[in-house]
Image (cartoon, grey):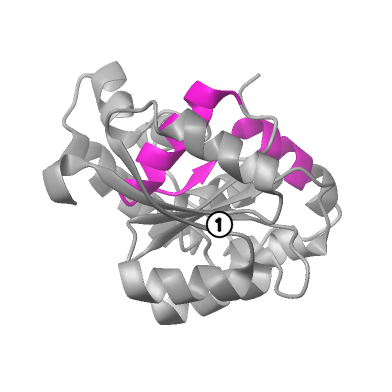
Amino acid sequence: MAENRIRLLIVDDHAVVRKGLVMMLRLEPDFEIIGEAENGAKAVKLAKQLQPDLVLLDFVMPEMDGQATAAALQAAAPDTRILMLTGVALDERVLEMLAVEVDGYVMKDIEPDELAQAIRTVARGEAYLHPSLARRLLNRVTERRPALPPQIQLTQREREILRWMATPATYREIAEKLFVSEETIRSHAKHILSKLQQPNRAQAVLAAVRAGLIDLPE
């Protein structure tokens, strides 16, 4: 990223929402808005051309929705990260989005500073799923069997870090709280994902809560 700025492509079919996001995010000194798109097809074309660091993508759009757009973006710009933004009620498609490893998922009623934090987190290569959204997802999957291997053995330290992973805190912030290096936290997180057989932080937290390994923070 040039000059450590996060290059963003904003995708939303509602002009008022899209322009509002652009105006708000331009206030952040480490963000650079390099493009806007009102539909999935244009988003894929711009992403292929501009190779943004992150696409802030609306979930519900006509013709080519967020799910289809995300899949096309992964093919057109594989190094670009995707943060999904939605204001609709959750349905099975949300769970499918997590299954295809969208990098982050936030609701449209998120506070501006939380959105900025989510963007920075995803741009650093970490998954982001806000606890409030995690709770809503859990309400949809409580009847499902936990997608976990039997007899999970987590150390006390791994359980502690897993509880921190269920918060919006970044790995750097978790390291500061626990007085260890960020690399140590990342190493523990890697072991946790391996033991839970989950591809990313968000899915690991959801699976762990469903299995009763941790509780979500209030």
Residue at 53 percent of width and 61 percent of height: 102
Magenta span contains residue 125: yes
Segment tinted magenta in the rendering: 111-138
Residue 75: percent from left, percent from top: 44, 82
Residue at 32 percent of width and 56 percent of height: 53
Q: Is residue 68 left or right of residue 43?
A: right
Amino acid under disc 1: Gln
Identify which residue, 186 or 5, lies in the foreground: 5
Identify which residue, 146 or 47, lies in the foreground: 47
| Quarter of the rendering occupied by the C terminus | top right
Decide whether the magenta segment is chiefly helix, strand or loop.
helix
Q: Is residue 191 above or below residue 75?
A: above
Query: Is residue 114 visible in the rendered structure shown here?
Result: yes
**Residue position marked by numbered label 1 in the rendering:** 151
Q: Is residue 52 above or below residue 161?
A: below
- Please identify the quarter of the rendering in which residue 71 is found: bottom right
Identify which residue, 213 or 81, lies in the foreground: 81
Circle 1 sits in a helix, a strand or a loop, which is it?
Answer: loop
Residue 38: percent from left, percent from top: 62, 60
